[in-house]
Amino acid sequence: MRPSLLAALLTPLILIATFTNCSSTGSNTAVNGAGANTSTAANAGPHDNVEELAMLVKLPVEPEEVAWKENPAQKKLVAVLRFSPENAGKLVAEIERTGQPTVETLPVESWYPAELVAQGELTGESTVTGTSFPAESFLNPPYTKGKITRVENTDYFILQISS
């Protein structure tokens, strides 16, 4: 058989096989995607988009890194924010005006940045200690109350707000 005739016969078969694979993958994705939408937001992985977070809360100072989870059913949002040393200082100056600080010990979640998880493991209790302030500078409806805690010896802050 000549190469051009063989190519002419095989090309439609290859195209059919390719499009059949693509369409079946697409339908599996649609089914999987629909299933994913039914899971609760609390079980979803953390977000890391600063712009998305800025649509939900006020960010008085630009963070370098964020990891956050929102639980709409419980009307809660927890975010871990890392700032440059300079911006961390600016943020502390801002939040010190909102109220008196308190010393807090917070549990470390598995989705927190590796540095905080490691620091939590050093305590043996998966907790970190820090200084908390009212989170008034961050509140944006529907969130009306909460606190922000600067984790001791770091430029990480844990924001916990709710309705």
Image (spheres, rainbow, N blue to C red):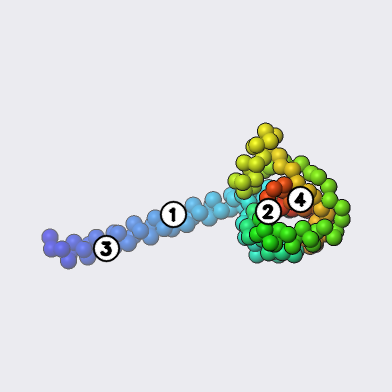
Q: In the image, residue 111 lies at what x, y percent?
A: 63, 46
Determine whether the residue tagged by mark 1 lies in a helix, strand or loop: helix
Question: In the image, what residue type sits under mark 3?
Answer: Thr
Q: Which residue is label 3 attached to?
A: 11
Viewer-proximal residue among 145 and 131: 131
Q: Which residue is label 2 attached to?
A: 155
Viewer-proximal residue among 85 and 63: 85
Q: Earlier in the sequence, mark 1 or mark 2?
A: 1
Q: Earlier in the sequence, mark 4 or mark 1?
A: 1
Is disc 3 surrounded by few (<14), some (14 to 19) or many (20+) residues within 10 Å?
Answer: few
Rendered image: mark on residue 24: 1
Rendered image: mark on residue 149: 4
Q: Nearer the viewer, mark 3 or mark 4?
A: 4
Q: Earlier in the sequence, mark 3 or mark 4?
A: 3
Question: In the image, what residue type sits under mark 4?
Answer: Thr
Q: Are marks 4 and 2 in contact (CB under 8 Å)?
A: no
Q: Earlier in the sequence, mark 4 or mark 2?
A: 4
Is disc 1 surrounded by few (<14), some (14 to 19) or many (20+) residues within 10 Å?
Answer: few
Determine whether the residue tagged by mark 2 lies in a helix, strand or loop: loop
**Relative side of 129 to 2, left or right:** right
**Relative side of 83 to 130, left or right:** left
Q: In the image, residue 74 lies at what x, y percent?
A: 77, 49
- Whether 127 is drawn above or below 67: the answer is above
Question: In the displayed image of the protein, which residue is found farthest to the right?
Answer: 100
